[in-house]
């Protein structure tokens, strides 16, 4: 079993909720990313989801788009991201790292070469936003050779037949996108999420995490009560956007305060 | 795959396959939220494309609203000046709204109506597809939002105002390079959010399946007419068909009905910008690498780490880093040829057509004219070239005036 499944199944066994935190690699500055990852872990994050900067992040809302642009301004490409993961991994052998990005940089590096280098760097999972399972055959094979779990998104618009297929193709955890829309948009309808999550349970033996629309302890609590974990991205990234004005230590502290608040809400949801 | 590797039951016009693949190209590379909407669109289109009532509606609007058929005009003086093959112009510039874009918009607006979607969205570069979308929205009583890069809004203020007159909302896009590709990203984001009541009219033969197929089918009226008109006027088939290629909708529209006519050379002309060697251009079929963007696999302008490169062309409508997947496939199986023409050559062709034929071509179409004129001079006077004159150039007058240093306030 890989590091990701070990952590996601382990948490479930212990009746603990998983906290997945998303940041874009290289945002706001490449020098900050590895330190930020360690601080996230210390404040209660279980799994790090690291965004791979891309010029055309078509599924992202304005907050995360801006983060991609800040990272690209520092020339953070896929190769640089893998270097950051390797540096993180040299000091943290336990916390799973999932890359989240778009297909083209991976395709350009080559599926085989990417899988090997990512595996060597200590990457545990991969979410390729614009790669549905139908087109993913070749990449999946190479990922599995190198112990990287493919993770797919499920959307409110996903029908039952597709949901079954996606759950079968997923490893580590299943990621339910709770909103129609881009990252960081809209507000959550907890009842609708609950209905969907309950119906997904029938064919998703894996831990089921919910993302999109969770921004603090208040929004995390009710979702944690129905899912196995939460993914928080835009709320964290929005704090990092102020780094230039406020200084990097201040914004990292802001992030840590937020993640600690969310951790407390997750723990309270099972007590 | 080459021509001879096609399966026994496959003709060149039988693509894409059911998953939207043209050989190794095309497909459906989008986020999960859109998969359902693309299935719904595929299903709706598959049932409507064979529905006589739908086809009659389409034909009626083509005739009475767009003004089809468009003429096939023999350009006598341009032919004389080129000194070789005879040059014919397929006059898509004479369509309502001044370009071929309306053919696709009429078809997709009808689709939207049949699917019960009261709102349409579109992306636009030069504004031609935005104007055509706003136009059909007014015609069919649909709400319309057009996404346009903030850079392009500056360059194309006339079309922006025109869209507003037509009742559309024009949303400036300030992300990325602030041009066409970013407008497309933003339109996708709108669609993801409003997928229940909104149909996205993609303006070119790119995007995820079924868009490349749908847009091609609606645009193929151009080639069907041209093929028949040529047969009636001249007899037989032309020796070559030439069209400009940005995303590639006007080219695919005129090429498609000629795909099985192996004697007809099909030539797509990309935007060479400052020259293909300069790197400052928008010619992915000449100088790109295969990758995935905007929902499909195709040739792309990209850097060695797979980031999408900024492109350049004097013509906003060709200023796009990708190209429709069917073109990528036609290039690889060597059924079509793809060349590039520089900004300067296109500008010269623009001036020449004004002076020799009294026709004001779009800068996009001027790329096709420039190459066709050069090609004609290398061919015999008994041979024939059909050029798709995809749009008129009124929108480009401010650009030309600026180049000439003339203020036209």
Image (cartoon, rainbow, N blue to C red):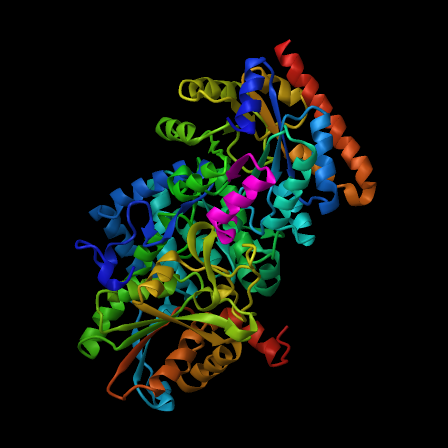
Return the x and y of residue A98 as percentages of the image width and height: 57, 35
Whether residue B21 can be seen here: yes
**Observer-nearest of B213 and A43:** A43
Which range is magenta? Answer: A106-128
In the rendered view of the protein, which quadrant contains the C terminus of chain B? bottom right
**Magenta stretch: helix, strand or loop mostly:** helix
**Observer-nearest of B165 and B316:** B316
Indicate the quadrant where residue A64 lies.
Answer: top right
Return the x and y of residue B138 as percentages of the image width and height: 43, 51
Q: Residue at x 54, y 71 (%)?
A: B314
- Residue B222 in the magenta stretch? The answer is no
In the rendered view of the protein, which quadrant contains the N terminus of chain B? bottom left
Q: Is residue B90 left or right of residue A111?
A: left
Return the x and y of residue B126 as percentages of the image width and height: 52, 63
Residue closest to the far top:
A271
**Observer-nearest of A88 and B403:** A88
- Residue A111 in the magenta stretch? The answer is yes
Q: Residue at x 56, y 70 (%)?
A: B280
Whether residue A157 can be seen here: no
Q: Is residue B8 left or right of residue A256?
A: left
Indicate the quadrant where residue B354 lies.
Answer: bottom left
Looking at the picture, does residue B303 appear above or below residue B112?
Answer: below
Q: Is residue B312 left or right of residue B392?
A: right
Disc count in the image?
0
Q: Residue at x 25, y 83 (%)?
A: B383
Return the x and y of residue B387 as percentages of the image width and height: 34, 75
Looking at the picture, does residue B409 appear above or below residue A34?
Answer: below
């Amino acid at each position: 079993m890989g590091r990701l499944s070990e952590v996601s199944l382990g948490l479930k066994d212990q009746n603990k909720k998983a906290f997945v935190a998303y940041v874009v690699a290289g945002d706001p500055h490449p020098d900050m990313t590895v330190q930020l990852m360690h601080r996230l872990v210390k404040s209660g994050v279980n799994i790090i989801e690291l965004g791979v900067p891309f010029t055309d992040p078509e599924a992202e809302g304005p907050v995360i788009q801006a983060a991609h642009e800040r990272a690209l301004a520092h020339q953070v490409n896929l190769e640089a991201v893998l270097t950051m993961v390797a540096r993180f991994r040299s000091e943290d052998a336990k916390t799973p790292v999932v890359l989240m990005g778009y297909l083209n940089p991976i395709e350009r590096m080559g599926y085989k070469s990417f899988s090997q280098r990512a595996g060597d760097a200590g990457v545990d999972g991969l979410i390729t936003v614009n790669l549905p399972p139908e087109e993913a055959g070749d990449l999946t094979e190479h990922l599995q050779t190198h112990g990287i779990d493919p993770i797919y998104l499920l959307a409110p618009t996903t029908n039952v037949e597709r949901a079954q297929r996606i759950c079968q193709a997923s490893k580590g955890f299943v990621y339910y996108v709770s909103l129609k829309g881009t990252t960081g948009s809209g507000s959550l309808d907890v009842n609708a999420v609950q209905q969907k999550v309950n119906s997904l349970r029938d064919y998703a033996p894996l831990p089921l995490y919910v993302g999109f629309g969770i921004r603090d302890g208040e929004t995390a609590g009710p979702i944690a009560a129905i899912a196995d974990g939460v993914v928080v991205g835009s709320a964290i990234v929005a704090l990092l956007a102020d780094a230039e004005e406020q200084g990097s230590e201040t914004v990292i502290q802001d992030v840590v305060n937020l993640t600690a608040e969310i951790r407390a809400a997750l723990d309270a949801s099972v007590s | 795959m080459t021509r001879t590797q096609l399966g026994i039951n496959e003709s060149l016009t039988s693509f894409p396959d059911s998953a939207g693949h043209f050989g190794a190209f095309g497909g459906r590379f989008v986020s999960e939220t859109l998969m359902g909407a693309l299935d719904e669109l595929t299903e709706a289109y598959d049932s409507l494309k064979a529905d006589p009532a739908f086809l009659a509606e389409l034909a009626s609007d083509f005739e009475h609203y767009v003004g089809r058929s468009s003429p096939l005009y023999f350009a006598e003086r341009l032919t004389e000046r080129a000194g070789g093959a005879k040059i014919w112009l397929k006059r898509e510039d004479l369509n309502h709204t001044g370009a071929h874009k309306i053919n696709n918009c009429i078809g997709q607006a009808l689709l939207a109506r049949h699917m019960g979607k009261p709102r349409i969205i579109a992306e636009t570069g030069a504004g031609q597809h935005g104007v055509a979308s706003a136009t059909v929205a007014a015609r069919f009583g649909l709400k319309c939002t057009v996404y346009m890069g903030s850079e392009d809004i500056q360059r194309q203020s006339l079309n922006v105002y025109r869209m507003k007159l037509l009742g559309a909302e024009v949303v400036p896009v300030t992300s990325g390079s602030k041009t066409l590709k970013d407008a497309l990203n933003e339109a996708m984001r709108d669609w993801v959010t409003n997928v229940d009541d909104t149909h996205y009219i993609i303006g070119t033969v790119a995007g995820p399946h079924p868009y490349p197929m749908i847009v091609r089918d609606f645009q193929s009226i151009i080639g069907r007419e041209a093929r028949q008109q040529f047969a009636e006027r001249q007899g037989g088939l032309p020796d070559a068909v030439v069209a400009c290629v940005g995303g590639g909708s006007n080219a695919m529209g005129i090429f498609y009905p000629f795909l099985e006519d192996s004697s007809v050379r099909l030539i797509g002309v990309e935007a060479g910008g400052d020259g293909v060697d300069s790197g400052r251009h928008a010619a992915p079929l000449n100088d790109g690498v295969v990758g995935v963007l905007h929902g499909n696999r195709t040739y792309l302008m990209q850097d060695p780490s797979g980031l999408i490169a900024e492109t350049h062309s004097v013509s906003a409508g060709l200023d796009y880093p990708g190209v429709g997947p069917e073109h990528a496939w036609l290039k690889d199986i060597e059924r079509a040829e793809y060349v590039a023409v520089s900004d300067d050559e296109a500008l010269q062709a623009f001036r020449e057509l004004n002076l020799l034929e009294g026709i004001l071509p779009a800068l996009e179409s001027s790329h096709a004219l420039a190459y066709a004129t050069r090609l004609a001079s290398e061919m015999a006077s008994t041979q024939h070239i059909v050029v798709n004159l995809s749009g008129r150039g009124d929108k480009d007058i401010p650009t030309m005036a600026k180049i000439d240093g003339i203020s036209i306030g």
